[in-house]
């Protein structure tokens, strides 16, 4: 449990699960024509490149956290559909115990859906690429903003700021909401915007109770072609897809510490390794990063990490 799983044993495929995609973090397998096995490894990326070694437990943490939010949405936004079918690897796959153990906690059975080719970002605070654009042109994703905003300032209301969803290796590009409407179509864009903002608000209010500010987050959406309804897919509200800030250290006018990869990014920059391929993180950076992820997990879910891993 202390070694990072950076790739899933290829024996999984010998047991009839065809790998259909491999992302920076996840491996995706076909179960049948309607469902996928969605597996998060312990891989970690920074500045768009994957590190050589991983962060032990990270994949399970991302998966359990995503499931936690999906459960919350069930009660808070009952009409919202998610792609989650099951949080456990089905016995019917007849995987040997070793493989079953490797996949446990890091996997979800999800509905196979047509993915809308945009990233549905919601920003509650002005930071990151939003802040960079604002400084240059007074806009965020082309949206005219009030003058005089300061770095990390809370916005009057959450802003829907989509980006393209680039092919593997390419970089996502910020686009205007209008451009997103053209890409996915007016009807779906309207629903994606509405439910992304709703989900952001529910999560923001929930996180605030544990002293965490949800600065921004990225959702992905799919389409159920049988019912013509949008479905929330992918991981949600994890440190990989969101900026979480400790509320007690929040201060307008500067960048904020966050729960995610700050240690790793700072180390890469310091060592001149930013953007380099095949970088191996020293044990200290792995440990510090792991503990940040765990802290976020425990604060946000109210569950002890070791205990969450012990369950089910
Ligand atoms: P990239 O694929 O560019 O590396 P990434 O690092 O975000 O992006 P991962 O998180 O590793 O990718 O893999 C998740 C992939 O699975 C994403 O491309 C996402 O759009 C896709 N996906 C998520 N949920 C579903 C679903 N229910 N049906 C089909 N595809 C899905
Ligand atoms: Mg992803």
Image (spheres, rainbow, N blue to C red):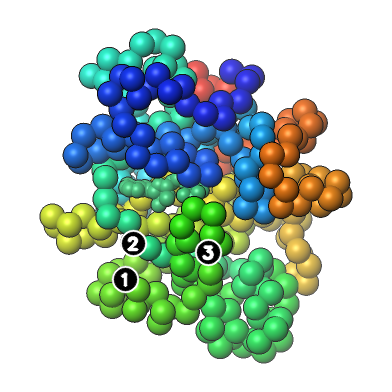
Percent across and percent down for residue 156 are: 56, 77
Looking at the image, tell me whether mark 3 or mark 2 is earlier in sequence order.
2
Q: CA distance from mark 2 to mark 1?
A: 7 Å
Q: CA distance from mark 1 to mark 3?
A: 16 Å
Q: Residue at x 50, y 18 (%)?
A: 310
Image disc number at residue 17:
none
Q: Are marks 2 and 1 in contact (CB under 8 Å)?
A: yes
Residue 122 to residue 8: above or below: below
Q: Residue at x 26, y 32 (%)?
A: 31
Name the residue that disc number 2 marks. Answer: 116
Asked whether mark 3 and ligand 1 are closer than 8 Å, the reply comes as: no
Would residue 42 appear left or right of 36 to someone viewing this image? right
Q: Is residue 312 visible?
A: no
Percent across and percent down for residue 88 are: 34, 26
Q: Secondary structure at mark 3?
A: loop
Name the residue that disc number 1 marks. Answer: 184
Looking at the image, tell me whether mark 1 or mark 3 is earlier in sequence order.
3
Would residue 235 appear left or right of 190 to someone viewing this image? right
Looking at the image, tell me whether mark 2 or mark 1 is earlier in sequence order.
2
Q: Residue at x 43, y 23 (%)?
A: 10
Where the N terminus falls, by quadrant? Answer: top right
Name the residue that disc number 3 marks. Answer: 172
Percent across and percent down for residue 27 are: 43, 36
């Amino acid at each position: 449990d202390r070694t990072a799983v950076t790739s899933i044993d290829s024996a999984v495929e010998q047991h009839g699960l065809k790998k259909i995609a491999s992302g920076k973090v996840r491996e995706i397998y076909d179960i049948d024509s309607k469902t996928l096995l969605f597996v998060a490894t312990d891989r970690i990326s920074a500045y768009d490149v994957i590190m050589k070694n991983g962060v032990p437990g990270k994949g399970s943490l991302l998966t359990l956290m995503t499931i936690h939010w999906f459960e919350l949405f069930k009660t808070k936004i009952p009409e919202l559909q998610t792609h989650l079918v099951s949080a456990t690897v089905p016995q019917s796959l007849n995987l040997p115990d070793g493989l079953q153990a490797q996949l446990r906690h890091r996997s979800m059975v999800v509905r196979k859906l047509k993915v809308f080719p945009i990233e549905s970002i919601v920003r509650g605070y002005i930071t990151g690429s939003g802040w960079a654009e604002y400084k240059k042109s007074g806009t965020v994703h082309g949206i005219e903003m009030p003058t005089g905003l300061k770095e990390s300032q809370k916005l009057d209301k959450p802003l829907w700021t989509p980006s393209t969803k680039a092919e593997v290796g390419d970089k996502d590009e910020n686009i205007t909401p209008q451009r997103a409407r053209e890409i996915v179509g007016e009807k779906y864009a309207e629903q994606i915007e509405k439910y992304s903002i709703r989900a952001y608000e529910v999560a923001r209010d929930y996180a605030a109770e544990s002293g965490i500010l949800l600065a921004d987050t990225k959702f992905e959406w799919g389409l159920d072609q049988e019912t013509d309804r949008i479905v929330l897919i992918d991981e949600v509200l994890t440190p990989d897809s969101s900026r979480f800030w400790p509320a007690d250290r929040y201060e307008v006018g500067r960048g904020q510490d966050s729960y995610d990869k700050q240690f790793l990014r700072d180390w890469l920059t310091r060592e001149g390794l930013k953007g380099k391929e095949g970088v191996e993180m020293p044990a200290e950076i792995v440990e510090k990063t792991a503990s940040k992820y765990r802290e976020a997990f425990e604060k946000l879910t109210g569950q002890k990490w070791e205990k969450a891993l012990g369950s089910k």
